[in-house]
Amino acid sequence: MENTMEQKKNLKGKYHDEILFARHKDNPLITPDMCPYPINTIFNPAAAEVNGETVLLTRVEDKHGISHLTVARSKDGISDWKIDKSPSLEPEPEKYPEEELGIEDPRITWLEELKVWAITYTAVSKDGPLVSLATTKDFKTFKKLGPILRQHDKDAALFPKRVNGRWAIIHRPTLSHLVPAHMWISFSHDLKHWGDFQIIMRARKGNAWDGAKLGICPEPLETPDGWLILYHGIRKTCYGSIYRIGLALLDLDKPWQVIRRSRDWVMTPLAPYELFGDVGNVIFPCGWIHDKKTGIVSLYYGGADTSIALATAPMKEILSYMKNCPEK
Ligand code: BMA
């Protein structure tokens, strides 16, 4: 970390990948030393705007290696973070055995119909990761609803409203470590029982930046041009995996149909806090906030599985970028 902090001081100017998203000059905004209790790392935050405050639900890894979720709040979404004094949402293996090895990587979706924030997160069971669901109204108390998708599935985000009468979720099952892992969509009447599984976006082949695995980042955002989704793509190299991000637009009424998909990544690990940390070469966003007044999309992401950073882009520019993207 020391090395990273030293390099941060010298960090000026833009990186060559900043065509759409610009990194905040104060990155990383949240580092492990800011947590009021001892931890290893704080990263991969989901985000929500609650009563004018930015709320991040962060993944915190303890010094044993088990993750829980903790809330960080800020008035401007940049500075003066107030981090809960103890874990906000902990694994409870006695009640939820699938949480034995921790809970990770939350995504938050506001469900207007139910007037709750829904949190999909990864529960790490002895038999592999799966997707669990919790709800909250205030990010102070949480109600766990248990597993909704079985083992070897993660990176799940709910749509904010029903599509043709049913709830919809994007998720990423891993069927075998020998084949690429694609993004799927599934549907439910009650948020608990899911079906009609189908692949919506495939990992591209070979050395493509998203050739090995894909996974949705934050929840889909409704725009006039379609559902905007941000996803991470993984390329495997002899030096390890590189986690980059790209964008896609899905049809509003038939979200299993991809209208546009960025051919190239839109952000790649370049800053020291993305390159160095517990797991280097990782940009992993789980939350974004679209400020309808300014039109700015604020993207909160984990850097190198160690700290939390922010990048912003105007929604207008994102949508005009998407217009020039190919259909697949
Ligand atoms: C994924 C998840 C993320 C993590 C990433 C890089 O499988 O575990 O939480 O950021 O790997 O280590």
Image (cartoon, rainbow, N blue to C red):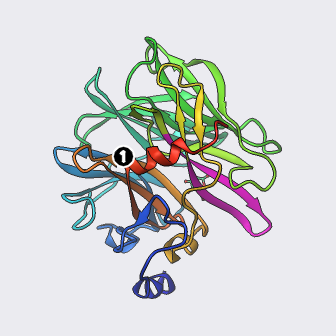
Foreground pick, 101 / 84: 84
The picture places residue 292, in percent across and down from the top left corner, at 26, 43
Tell me the quadrant of ligand 1. Answer: bottom right
How would you rate the neighbour count of disc 1 (Cα within 10 Å): few for under 14, some for 14-19, many for 20 or more? many
In the figure, residue 260 lies in which quadrant? top right
Residue span colored magenta: 229-246
In the image, taking residue 1 as reference, residue 300 lies left or right, namely left
- The answer, for residue 151, to whether it is visible in the render is no
| Position above or below: 210 against 6 | above
- Which residue is rendered at x = 63% and y = 54% of the image? 264
Residue drawn where x is 74% and y is 53% of the image: 208
Q: Is residue 178 left or right of residue 229?
A: right
Assess whether residue 232 is covered by the magenta stretch. Answer: yes
User: Does 268 sit above or below residue 96?
Assistant: below
Q: Nearer the viewer, residue 303 or 25?
A: 25
Magenta stretch contains residue 308:
no
Which residue is drawn at the image coordinates 53% and 20% (left, top)? 254
Q: Position of residue 319 (x, y in %)?
A: 45, 43
Regarding residue 67, the answer to whether it shows in the image is yes
Residue 279, image x, y percentages: 60, 67
Q: Which residue is mark 1?
A: 89
Amino acid carrying label 1: it is Leu
Quadrant for the C terminus in the image: top right
